[in-house]
Amino acid sequence: MIGVIPAAGIGQRMEAEIPKQYLVVAGKTLLDHSICALFNDPRIEQVWVALHEHDRWWPQSLYAKDQRVHTTQGGGTRAESVVAILNALLQQHAKKDALVVVHDAARPGLSTNALARVIDAAESEPERGALLALPVRDTVKFAHVQASSHVARTVDREQLWLAQTPQVFQLEPLLTAITHAQANKIAVTDESSAMESMGISPALVIGNRAGFKVTDPEDLALAEYYLQRASQ
Ligand code: CTP
Ligand code: MG
């Protein structure tokens, strides 16, 4: 099984001097935490990381010389970075139906238990695949404009889930789904949405709050808290 980590973003919302995946939290970069988390499951034998074309920080990674870890150049969007890795894997003659475990570099708090559960779910239904997600707890409002606005209506949260990663799918079907979505201008901010556009209904596996995506500056203290707690 292959870990796939898109890590080619610039971390605009983090407003840091360097891309957020290279910020150090609880003793390691976010990216190194994420790679480490994937190797906590013995089924993951190799990890592929997509890097920005002007990346200057990877050589300092704890995994830069690890034989199990490979890098490739990412693209202008997260989906393009994932596609770059999937294409590289096919070029390396990876099996077309191999399960790939796609995980954001910016989610360092992935627990071993949640990882095992999402892989278990994908292994039991490989054509469907699986993703971690959390049920929505807050009341959800719909508004017509993105920034501050007025409420148009309240949305029933009982049916809503927040998608996390890992998302686990078969290599070639996933590549086909993402390229199909891109060709049809369907927005794909995760792997599941690409598979859904092909009529697939992936399994939802309950994630945990520590698996949140580190996005803006105030997320760093929360990540530090979860990562310190997990290491105790
Ligand atoms: N990512 C990527 N290639 C891109 C954009 C994003 O590999 N062109 C990766 C990021 O490095 C991150 C993950 O996809 O690990 C989730 O994206 P996000 O949290 O949005 O990170 P950034 O795009 O870096 O942040 P921002 O949107 O604030 O610029
Ligand atoms: Mg982004």
Image (spheres, rainbow, N blue to C red):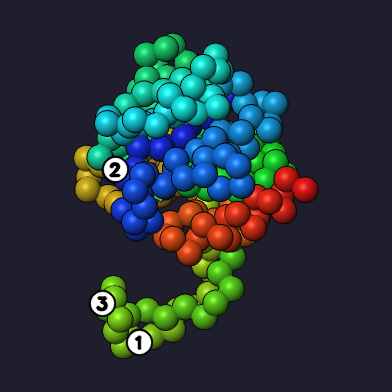
Residue 177 location, quadrant: top left
* Picture coordinates of residue 112, whole percent (x, y): 70, 41
> Number of labelled discs?
3
What residue is drawn where x is 65% and y is 50%? 227
* Picture coordinates of residue 99, whole percent (x, y): 54, 28
How far separated are the C-alphas under marks 1 and 2?
A: 31 Å
- For mark 1, give the secondary structure: loop
Say which of 179 and 132 sits in front: 132
Say which of 8 and 78 sits in front: 8
Q: Does residue 94 sit above or below 143 in this rendering?
A: above
* Picture coordinates of residue 125, whole percent (x, y): 61, 37
Q: Is residue 171 visible?
A: no
Q: Does residue 212 sit above or below 55 in this rendering?
A: below
Kind of residue at disc 3: Val
How far separated are the C-alphas under marks 2 and 3?
A: 23 Å
* Picture coordinates of residue 210, whole percent (x, y): 62, 55
Where the N terminus falls, by quadrant?
Answer: top right
Which label belongs to residue 151? 1
- Badge 2 is on which residue? 77
Left or right for 147, reference 65: left
Q: Is mark 2 within 8 Å of ligand 1?
A: yes
Which label belongs to residue 29? none
